[in-house]
Image: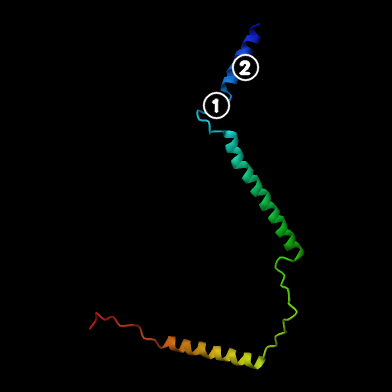
Amino acid sequence: MLEGDVMQQLKAFLNKRKARRGSYGQEGIRPQRDWQLMLYPTAIAVVAVSTLGFYVYNLVETGQFAAAQSSPGQKEVKINSELLKKQIQNLSDRAARWDALNQNVEPAKDPSLP
């Protein structure tokens, strides 16, 4: 009989400790709704990002992600090698002149010295 009495007291104590609808003092506070507001969007975002990741992975795996597509109106470009050599020579001459100018620069004098 004593065991049944202790069990009843324990059960009554635990029932008092349970969170009930009106136990938070304000009617608008509902922890279950708060958890749902946090977990549902998070779950939706995880599913969306996973789906996007799987889709991009498949595109990369099949080679369609960064594949350049040639249009039928594109023409083949021919490089004029003589003009290219002339331009390279021009750039080399400019670099040589720039280096020559930088070697002959005198350091600025201190204006406070006589």
Q: Is residue 2 above or below residue 108?
A: above
In this view, the residue in front, 110 or 57, is 57
- Provide residue 88's location: percent of width, then percent of height: 59, 89
Q: Residues within 10 Å of mark 1 (few under 14, many from 20)?
A: few
Left or right for 112, reference 87: left
Q: Quadrant of residue 61?
A: bottom right
The secondary structure type at the circle numbered 2 is: helix
Picture residue at 55% right of the left edge, 88% below the top: 91
Which residue shows up at 70% across the image and 68% down it?
66
Q: Residue at (52%, 28%) from the top-left corner? A: 24
Callout count:
2
Q: Earlier in the sequence, mark 1 or mark 2?
A: 2
For the C terminus, the quadrant is: bottom left
Toward the left, the furthest residue is 114
Residue 100, horizontal then vertical, whole percent:
46, 89
Report the quarter where the N terminus lies.
top right
Q: Quadrant of residue 92?
A: bottom right
Q: Residue furthest right?
A: 62
Q: Position of residue 14 (x, y in %)?
A: 59, 20
Q: Nearer the viewer, residue 64 or 84?
A: 64
Q: Residues within 10 Å of mark 2 (few under 14, many from 20)?
A: few
Tell me the residue that label 2 is attached to: 11
Q: Which residue is mark 1?
A: 22
For the residue marked with disc 2, what is the amino acid? Lys
Q: Give the answer, above or below, for where 70 lies relative to 58.
A: below
What residue appears at the point 28 percent right and 80 percent down from the top-left corner? 110
The image quadrant that residue 72 belongs to is: bottom right
In percent of width and height, residue 36 lies at 61, 39
